[in-house]
Image (spheres, rainbow, N blue to C red):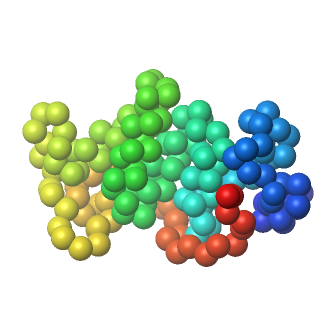
Amino acid sequence: VVPLERLLKVPLIADVTFDDPPESPARRLRYLALRNWPLTDADALHARRQALALDGSDAGLWHTVGRLALAQGDWLKARRALEKALQLAPTLHGAKTDLDALTYALGDAASGGGGVTPPDGPPAPPQQFGGGPGLSAAFAGTRVATGSSPRFKRMA
């Protein structure tokens, strides 16, 4: 098995651009390598966002991006990604549960919410907003790195 990082450095895959046709095998391999980047890696969110730039039609990948953004406290990115997942697949239950918990926690649910407005400054972890089972259960025992390092080539 070739590690994903090494695969992304292979010239044929590293040189993929947005101009390459979507059906290009090299573009598909790059997409799959980025989509399957380890969740505990510091570049997990960045890698998946690059995968979405190559193929934004994967509702499950949008859901994963939403969950990673939630874990990193980026509520806006999480909300946008979860909404996109549901736009692509309205019955994607996990995305609906996570989005409902996020909107409730932020206090803007359709019923008027009951959540808490986030404080100024850096966002706190989801548990501090009373996210209920959708957020706390979703991230119980999950370890997600929050740093970022440009270990793989960015597409032009």
Q: What percent of the width, then of the height, locates residue 62? A: 52, 42
Between 80 and 23, the one lying in front of the other is: 23
Place residue 95 in its image quadrant. top left
Locate the N terminus and report the quarter of the image it occupies. Answer: bottom right
Between 85 and 132, the one lying in front of the other is: 85
Q: What percent of the width, then of the height, locates residue 3? A: 82, 62
The residue that appears at 36% across and 46% down in the rendered structure is: 79
The residue that appears at 37% across and 60% down in the rendered structure is: 74
Q: What percent of the width, then of the height, locates residue 80? A: 39, 44
Figure label count:
0
Place residue 60 in its image quadrant. top right
Place residue 54 in its image quadrant. top right
Q: Looking at the image, can residue 3 be seen? A: no
Up the image or down, 87 lies above or below 18; here it is above
Up the image or down, 81 lies above or below 88; here it is below
The residue that appears at 77% across and 37% down in the rendered structure is: 21
Q: Is residue 147 left or right of residue 9?
A: left
Q: Is residue 1 left or right of residue 138?
A: right
Up the image or down, 32 lies above or below 40; here it is above
Locate the C terminus and report the quarter of the image it occupies. Answer: bottom right
